[in-house]
Image: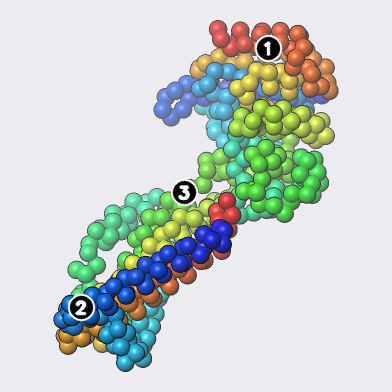
Amino acid sequence: MSKTRTNNIVLAPFLLFVVIVLSWELADKIFDFNKVILPSPSEIFLAFTENYIILFKATSITMIESILGFLLGSIIAYLLAILFLFSKTTREALYPYAIALKSTPLIAIAPLLVLWFGNGMFSKVIMSALVAFFPVLVNSVNGLNSVPKELLELMSSLSATSWKVLLKVRIPYSLDYLFSSLKIASSLAVVGAVIGEFIGSTEGIGYLINNASYYLDTSLMFAGIIMISIGGIAFFGFISYLEQKVIFWKRDK
Amino acid sequence: MDKTHIEISNLSFTYDSGIEIFKNLSLSIKKGEFISIVGPSGCGKSTLIRLIGDLLTPTRGEIKVENELNTKARKKGKFSFVFQDPVLLPWRTVEENISLPSEILISKEHYNPLELLKIVGLKDRGKMYPHQLSGGMKQRVAIARALSFKPSVLLMDEPFSAVDEFTRKILNQELLRIWNETGVTIIFITHSVSEAIFLSDRVFVLSSAPSTLKMDYHVPFSRPREKGLEESIEFIRSKKCLRQELII
């Protein structure tokens, strides 16, 4: 990528951001919006400076829940995908349930999970894991089966065991698919954790936003939303960065 | 050179779908021979080399290599494949790709990767990755990988049909040189009649399925074969003769 192009990717969204914030601030000065409905950028910034300690604490709790849930969900999904490869029966038995789970809205299960696992971090980790699980499972199954037919023939002409085929060919081939799903799962995991905090929690950014809404503290709600979206972007960005490092042959093409 | 290397007797093969590909096919191939197979598409050329290499199991009949069944020969690492798509592993360097077979067939004797790179003319590319190579170079790496464990039969399924005409000519010359240096028996599938004649000792013409051996053509040109050969009248006559056999 050329330098000018990199500059554009960073510069263009930044300029747009500046323009939106300035016009918002200006519009607020002219029309004097109700602060409860729409606070101005400067009011949001004020809310942020007054509450930055609790905002950071809440965001880090939610991010920890998201990351743990993400890891738990994707590791189980990947191991299950490998198991499916070796046992068709397992796949046929479990796949319909995985789809049923995917089709059930998380928010419908959330109260049950809080009931079972309490309103601490653990129920949020489970919630994150549940949403992260499905895309990783589907993509890993596809990825592990994406090896070209000729390569598999080559391996069998060498009398390779299925274990060696898995290690030397299938797993590396699946990484491309795996990372696409990890990017989706990273965003979903944050959603899962926040939903969990809305349903039943005494900490985290979901709790903070929900609580601020009771007090009609809209500025703080905005500050919370901005914090968690930065957290989500950073998480996504980190996974994208890892993808570039791991699948280097795709990047250089 | 006269020793029988591969003996196919009364080979029949029917796909699960019920399509009969071969019925009582018998062939014999000598050690170190270069055989090309031509035939209409769908006639089972690819199926035949997969049967020989024990990737498919015959419905009836048997295939013997050096007097033992091909199943046993495969386990000893006697067969090697090169496909139209080089199917290199993109995360491995050229050298690492070539040494893949040595990580699987541990007990067998292997060429030194560097020596092999020299043989296929890629001496200084060992540390490069496949995506940094041209199509022709990738195919050379695939050939080097195929030869790395000193197989006795090299089975090639249209290996050069995806490269341009110019590269193909060069690769043909190279392949003949490699064949000469290693003494491996080659069975080579191609769509190109002139490629088949240029390379081979014999050309097998197959009929459409269920295939029979329509013609066992002994190529009348001495070796080494020079570049100009393809323009000679005799060569064109040979081509005509084979083409006619293919059309009927």
Secondary structure type for disc 3? loop
| Sequence-first tag of 3 and 2 | 2
Q: What chain does badge 2 belong to?
A: A
Residue placed at 19% from the left, 68% from the top?
A: A108
Residue placed at 73% from the left, 20% from the top?
A: B198
Label 1 Cα crowd, 10 Å radius (few <14 / some 14-19 / many 20+):
many
Q: What chain does badge 3 belong to?
A: A
Are the residues under badges 3 and 1 in a single subunit? no
Q: Nearer the viewer, residue B243 or B227?
A: B227
Q: Nearer the viewer, mark 3 or mark 1?
A: 1
- Residue under pointer 1: B239
Q: Is residue B111 above or below residue A140?
A: above
Q: Is residue A24 left or right of residue A71?
A: left
Give x and y (percent) for residue A23: 29, 73
Q: Is residue A65 left or right of residue B162?
A: left
Q: What chain does badge 1 belong to?
A: B
Give x and y (percent) for residue A54: 33, 90
In the rendered image, the quadrant that contains the N terminus of chain B is: top right
Q: Identify residue type, mark 3.
A: Asn
Q: Identify residue type, mark 1.
A: Lys
Residue A38, can we see it? Answer: no
Residue placed at 57% from the left, 43% from the top?
A: A151
Q: How is the image coloured?
A: rainbow
- Residue under pointer 2: A30
Give x and y (percent) for residue B242: 65, 11
- Residue under pointer 3: A145
Label 3 Cα crowd, 10 Å radius (few <14 / some 14-19 / many 20+):
some
**Quarter-of-image position of residue A138:** bottom left
Q: CA distance from mark 1 to mark 2?
A: 88 Å
